[in-house]
Amino acid sequence: MCLLSLSLPAQASTKKLLVIGEEFAPYEFVQDGQVVGIDIDICDRIFAKLGYDVEYRIMPWKRAWYHVEKGLADVVLTTSRKAAREPFVWYPKTDMWQGDFVFFYQKGRFKPEFLDLHYAKTQGLSVGIIQGNSYHQSVWQQFPYGNGRDSFQGDLTRETLHPQLYPVASLKQNLLKVASGRVDVTIANKTYGMYTAKLLGVADQLAYSTQPLYSKRYPAAFIKRSVHPDIQQIATEFDRELATFKKTQEYQNIIAKWLN
């Protein structure tokens, strides 16, 4: 497993790959100085079979996407499928995983069965989000940008956000703000939110909405501007191996290792 390191251009070696992503525990995060998690274990297994050495780096999402646009890495994890991203990445057909998104809130403040996007909008709730995250079309329809656009405007956009949206760099910040009452709710993948709340020691202070706000699929995206000469071929091979690997007990063991 590779140690967390400073941000440098991707290696040109044909047998080395730089894989980046934002913190998204338990899928990818830093623990005791190492990048670990479900996606890391899966990538280790597949890239080793394909004959590649991998370095992993975790960084805020906007910085990660800067690496994508500048071709400073080879693969970016936890990247949902968006038309605005397609000029920069190849999406394999097979997803790493799929998950539901919910509102996290300070326990006792709201009735979870009533808490949805429409309720948050009409009640004037402050909503913590992560800078550059794409969320879902339904979020932007309820909380359009300052220019009135109601669809995701890109990972590095400088468009003014809806006044009820409060952006920060990480989910950790959002959960701590919710726990302390500085924002009313935050949108997060349920597994990611629960896992991170436990890591922060605030799980007993938080609850989440009963019904999912939406569901999203997450592939490992391969960066078109990567300096690796075979990156598109690697994407194809990875997709084939992942589809096969997801049918195995070893894949299920990796999931159980982190979620149980």
Image (cartoon, rainbow, N blue to C red):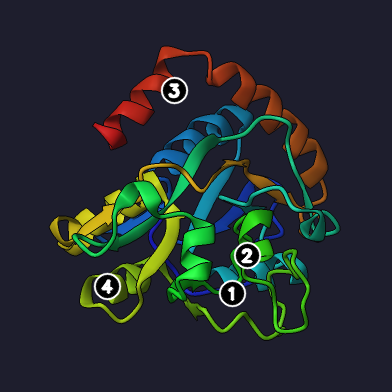
Mark 1 lies on a secondary structure that is helix
Q: Taking 10 as reference, is 237 above or below it?
A: above
Which dot, 4 or 2, sits closer to the camera?
A: 2
Instruction: Please report whichever mark, 2 or 3, sits nearer to the chain's N-terminal start.
Output: 2
For marks 1 and 2, give the CA distance: 27 Å
Left or right of 167, for residue 195: left
Q: Give the amino acid at mark 4.
A: Leu
Instruction: Please report whichever mark, 4 or 2, sits nearer to the chain's N-terminal start.
Output: 2
Name which residue lies at 45% across and 71% down: 123
The image shows residue 210 at horizontal and vertical percentages of 36, 43
For marks 4 and 1, give the CA distance: 22 Å
Q: Mark 2 points at which residue?
A: 142
- The quarter of the picture where residue 256 lies is top left
Q: Quadrant of the C terminus?
A: top left
- The quarter of the picture where residue 12 lies is bottom right
Q: Name the residue under label 3.
A: 251
Mark 2 lies on a secondary structure that is helix
Q: Mark 1 points at which residue?
A: 63
Mark 4 lies on a secondary structure that is helix
For marks 3 and 4, give the CA distance: 32 Å
The image shows residue 5 at horizontal and vertical percentages of 44, 69
Instruction: Please report whichever mark, 4 or 1, sits nearer to the chain's N-terminal start.
Output: 1
For marks 2 and 3, give the CA distance: 37 Å
The image shows residue 14 at horizontal and vertical percentages of 71, 48
Which dot, 1 or 2, sits closer to the camera?
A: 2
How many other residues sit within 10 Å of disc 4, few (<14), some (14-19) or many (≥20)? some
Q: Taking 49 as reference, is 40 above or below it?
A: below
Residue 43 visible somewhere in the drawing: no
182 or 211: which is nearer to us? 211
Q: Give the amino acid at mark 2.
A: Gln
Mark 3 lies on a secondary structure that is helix
